[in-house]
Amino acid sequence: MTFVVTENCIKCKYTDCVEVCPVDCFHEGPNFLAIDPEECIDCTLCEPECPVEAILSEDDLPEDQAHFLELNAELAAKWPVITEIKPAPDDADEWADKPNKLELLER
């Protein structure tokens, strides 16, 4: 099993989660983070660190977020690893909990 970064991360991109990851499975894109499912050890440390609740266990993914499992794998293969906290975008709080952000994902 793996954890998955979901739509809530798009344009929020808080990085609190990356610092607690013991296996460095987070990858950073322009406005989203992705978890490499091959590296994730299901330790559960990242999930409570996300202030916008964008990280879920693959077993808990709602049907409308299920495609994020494959998307995380695809993007993690392309993007560099991130291991240190960075400042969130200035408007991150404005984007939290907004629906239908997938089209805003920058690859």
Image (cartoon, rainbow, N blue to C red):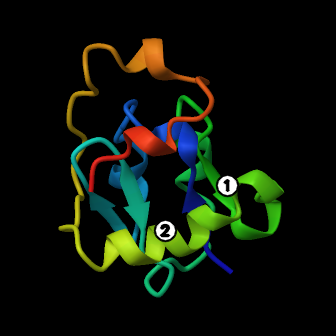
Q: Is residue 24 left or right of residue 42?
A: left
- The image quarter containing residue 42 is bottom right
Q: Determine if residue 23 is in view.
A: no
Residue for badge 2: 71
* Residue carrying label 1: 56
**Nearest to the observer: residue 63 or residue 58:** 63
- Which dot marks residue 69? none
Residue 75 at what x, y percent from top left? Answer: 35, 69
The amino acid pointed to by label 1 is Leu
Q: Amino acid at mark 2?
A: Leu
Dot 2 alpha-carbon crowd within 10 angstroms: few under 14, some 14 to 19, many 20 or more: some
Determine which quarter of the picture holds residue 68. Answer: bottom right
Q: Residue shown at 63%/29% (left/top)?
A: 99
Which of 43/81 is in front? 81
Residue at 20%, 37% (x, y): give it. 86
Q: Earlier in the sequence, mark 2 or mark 1?
A: 1
Given residues 65 and 17, the one toward you in this image is 65
Residue at 53% across / 29% down in the picture? 51
Q: Quadrant of the N terminus?
A: bottom right
Which mark lies nearer to you, 2 or 1? Answer: 2
Horizontal and vertical percent position of residue 20: 41, 54
Asked whether the residues under the numbered discs 2 and 1 touch, taking CB atoms below 8 Å apart as contact, a structural biologist would say no
Place of residue 38 in the rendered image (x, y in percent of width and height, measured from the top left) = 47, 87
Within-10-Å neighbours for mark 1: few <14, some 14–19, many 20+: many
- Horizontal arrangement in the rendering, residue 8 relative to residue 73 (left or right): right
Return the x and y of residue 98 as percentages of the image width and height. Answer: 58, 23
Q: Secondary structure at mark 2?
A: helix
Judging from the image, what secondary structure is the residue with disc 1 in?
strand
